[in-house]
Amino acid sequence: MMPDAGKFIVQFLENSGIDRVYCVPGESFLPVLDALVDSKIETLTTRHESAAGFMAVADGRLTGRPGVAMVSRGPGVTNASIAVHTAQQDGLPMLLFVGQVERRNLRRDGFQEIDYGKMFADIAKLTVEVRDPDDLPQILSRAFFTAVSGTPGPVVIALPEDLLALPVTTAEAVPSDMPLYTLPASGPSLSAVSQAARLLSRASRPLIIAGMEFAREGGRELLMRFAEKFSVPVAVSFRRHDLFPNRHPLYAGDLGIANPPAQLDLFGSADLVLALGTRLGDLTTHGYTFPLSPWPRQPLVHVYDDASLVGRHFNPVVGAACKAPDFLAMLLREDCGPADGARADWARSLHEQTCRQNAWTPSRQPDGVVFRNVVHELSSQLGPDTSIVPDAGISAALVYRFFPFSGAQRLYATMAGVMGFGIPGAIAVAMREPRRTVVCLVGDGGFMMTGNDLAIAVEKKLPVRVFLANNRNLGTIHFHQEKLYPGRSRASALPGPDFTRLVRAFGCTALTLDSEEDIAKVVAEALAVSGPVVVDVRTSLRALTAPAGT
C-alpha cells in the first residue's frame, strides 16, 4: 500500500536517523502529526514556535544531523523564522516543515498564506514548496543534503494542506539498503599540506584561529596535539571558547567583540595565520581587518569545508576546501618545527595578555549582586562534564570572559546573539546529554521571551540549572546607552514579575540570590537539585557601568 505524503515524510525522517521533532501543531499539517503517532520519533510540543526552532537548532549542533521543527503557516512560521536566521548565522543544519494553504489557493492571498521562497530567500539555504506528492523523495533527499553539505544551514519545506493526504506513488522507488543522501568525499591535497608545512617551519610567530569544525568528535584532541607538537598558539574564533583549554599556556584567547587594542596588536604581529575550520566572519576578523581583507599583512592559510568561502573575503597563500581536522592530521605528519626559539616567548606573550584582561577580581555594588561573581563561582564549582548554554547580552558576555573552559566542558552559544535561545537551547541540550550538568545563564529579558518552555523541563524532570540575571533591565542596551548618552537611558527598563513565584507556578524549584555572601551556598544548592531549578539572582545594574575594579 502506498503511503500518503504525511506518512512518507515521517518514514523518510525515521530512515534518515531523525529521532525527535519539535513543533507547535497546526491544522495545516494534520496528516504529518497523525503519522507521528505510529512513529518511533519523539514529538515535543513547545509553547512557542521560536522555541521549537531554537531546540531544532541546538539539536542540529549536538547531533550533526538536521534538527527538525514543524510549525503551521503564516503566524507560526513567522514566529519560527528567528531560529532559521540563527541556524544560518551559526552554520547549523536545520529542517523547518511548514504548513501551507491548499494548492488551488496558492498566490491568491489566501488565509495565512506567505510566499516562503520570498520570505526566506536570504536566510535559508533552500526553500521548497511541494506541489506534487510524487516529488517528495527527491525533495527530501535534496533537503537533507543541502542542510548538511558545505556550510550547514536551514532548509524550509512548505507543505500545502491538501497534498498531505495524497498517495506518494514513487515511494516504492526509494531504496531501503542505501543512504537517502550522501555527501561527496573530500580531502586535503598533499601540495596544500606541504606548502602549509613549509610556511609554518619558517614562522617564528604563527597563530592558529580555530573554528567550529574542531567541535566534531576528536577535533579538540587533534588541535591540542598539533599545537603542542609545534608550539603554535591557538586563538578561538567568535564564541568557540571550548575548542581549546583556556588555561593552557598555548591558549591565545578568543577573537570577537571584546578584544582590547593591546591584544589586537599582538595578534597583528603574527608572521603566519592558520585559519582552520572557521568561516572568518566579520566578528572573528574585527570587520575584516585581522586578517586584513582582501590581502592579509601576513601569509594566510585558510582551511574550511566550503569552497565558496575560501578566498571570498581574503586571498590566502594556501586555500583548502576540506575538513580542517583532516588537513591538520596530515600536517601533523610534516616537519613544521620551530624555526628558532622565539615561539615560546611568542606564546607566552599571547597567553599572559589573555590572562590579564580576563582576570576576575571580586566586586560589590549597593544595588544587587554582581553577576560576574556568580559566573566566577560557577567556574569554581562546576566539573568537567558541564555544558554551558548562554542566552544573549551581558549574562552571556560574562561567561566568555570569566568562565575559563577546560577539558570536556562545552559551550553552546549562538553566533547570532539571539535573545530567547537560552531556555529552549538548554532543554534540547539536557535531553541529548542526560549525564552532563547543563547550566543556562539568561537575563530577565531573554527569560521573558521563551521562559514558558520551562514547562517542558518540569514535565521531563530535566536537571537544567538556570541562573537568571535579574536587574529589571535590558542590560546590554542600558550599557551602550549610558556609554553614548549618559543619563538618557530610554526603553531599556524592564519591570517584570516575581520570578520566584512565576517559576514555582510551573512546578519548578526556585531559589533566590540577593547577597554576595550567599553566592557559594546558593550555587552549590542549585547544582544539587535533581530536577530543573531557576536561581533568581537579584543583579546589580550599576555594575554594568561602574569603573573597572569597583
Image (cartoon, rainbow, N blue to C red):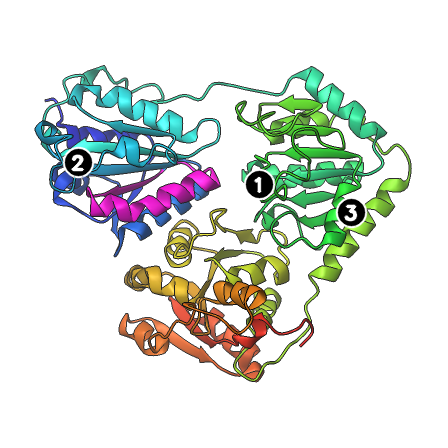
What residue did someone put label 1 on?
A: 282
Q: Amino acid at mark 3?
A: Leu
Count residues near mark 2 (Cα–Cα under 10 Å), then give few for <14, some for 14-19, many for 20+.
many
Q: CA distance from mark 2 to mark 3?
A: 54 Å
In contact (CB < 8 Å): disc 2 and disc 3? no
Q: Is residue 72 magenta?
A: yes
**Residue 100, label in figure:** 2
Residue under the image location 31 percent in, 74 percent down: 502
Q: In this rendering, would 440 be left or right of 208?
A: left
Q: Earlier in the sequence, mark 1 or mark 2?
A: 2
Name above or below for residue 547 compared with residue 97: below
- In percent of width and height, residue 154 lies at 37, 35
Name the image quarter holding the N terminus.
top left
Name the residue located 41 percent from the left edge and 21 percent from the top edge.
182
Which region of the structure is painted magenta? 67-93
- Residue 14 can be seen in this image: no
Q: Name the residue at 24% across, 40% down.
A: 40
Residue to which mark 3 is pinned? 266
Disc 1 is placed on an element classified as: loop
